[in-house]
Amino acid sequence: MSRFFGEIRQLGYVVTDIEAAMDYWSKTLGVGPWYYNPRVPIENYQYKGQAYEPHNSVALANSGPLQVELIQTRNDVPSMYRDFQQAGNTGLQHVAYWTQRYDEDLERLLAQGFKPVMSGEVGKNGRFIYFDTEYHPGTVIELSEVAGPKGKLFDLIRSASEQWDGSEPVRPFPDLTAL
C-alpha cells in the first residue's frame, strides 16, 4: 500500500509479442484468462501535449486483486511505451493506481509537483494519465479512472480470474458501450 496513492492495482508490461506473452503468463504462470483487444480505442490521446492516434494492443488478466496489463505498440506514435522500448527495455513499465475521484486525485498530484507526460480516455469515465516518474525502469506511475465502463470491465476480469480453470485462456474485450 502506498501512503500517497493507495493500493497498486495494476502492473503494466510492455512486450514485443503480446500473443507469446499471454501464452507464457497463462501456461507457465497460470494467470488468466486474458481479455485481449488488438486495437484499444483510445480517445483524446496526448503525449507531451501533442495529440496522436496510437494503435496499441492490450491484454488484461488478474492474479488475485492485482491486474496485469500486457501492451504491444503497433505503430510508431510517440508514447512512454515507445520511449521505454527505445531505451532498450521490455517488461514492467508502469504501476497503476485506480480512482473513482479522478479530478480530485489529479489536482492533488499536480499540486504535489507530478508532471503529466501521456494521457487519454478509454470509454466514458475511463481517463488515464502517466507521470514523469521513471527514475529506473518500471516506475512510471499511472492514475486510472475506473468510474465508468472501464471499471466494470476490470470487475469482470477479476471475477473471471477467481474460478478460472485454464479454459479459454484468451477472450475478446467486451464492448465498453454495453457495460
Image (cartoon, grey):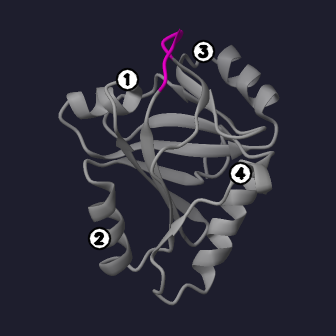
Q: Secondary structure at mark 1?
A: loop
Q: How many marks?
A: 4
Name the residue rendered at 68%, 46% in the picture.
98
Which comes before the other along the chain, label 4 or label 2?
2
Along the horizontal axis of the image, is 80 left or right of 43? left
Distance between mark 1 and mark 2 Cα atoms: 27 Å
x, y (%) of residue 35?
Answer: 53, 63
Q: Which-is-in-front pick, marks 3 and 2? A: 2
x, y (%) of residue 6?
Answer: 67, 47
Residue, disc 2 = 24
Q: Which-is-in-front pick, marks 1 and 2? A: 1
- Residue 113 shows which numbered tag? 3
Residue range (magenta): 47-53
Q: Residues within 10 Å of mark 2 (few under 14, many from 20)?
A: few
Give, as a three-letter code, the residue at label 2: Tyr
Q: Residues within 10 Å of mark 3 (few under 14, many from 20)?
A: few
Q: Residues within 10 Å of mark 4 (few under 14, many from 20)?
A: some
Q: Quadrant of residue 19?
A: bottom left
User: Closer to the camera, 67 or 74?
Assistant: 74
Residue, disc 4 = 176
Which comes before the other along the chain, label 4 or label 1?
1
Along the horizontal axis of the image, is 57 left or right of 60? left
Q: Secondary structure at mark 2?
A: helix
Q: Residues within 10 Å of mark 1 (few under 14, many from 20)?
A: some
Along the horizontal axis of the image, is 50 left or right of 80? right
Residue, disc 1 = 77
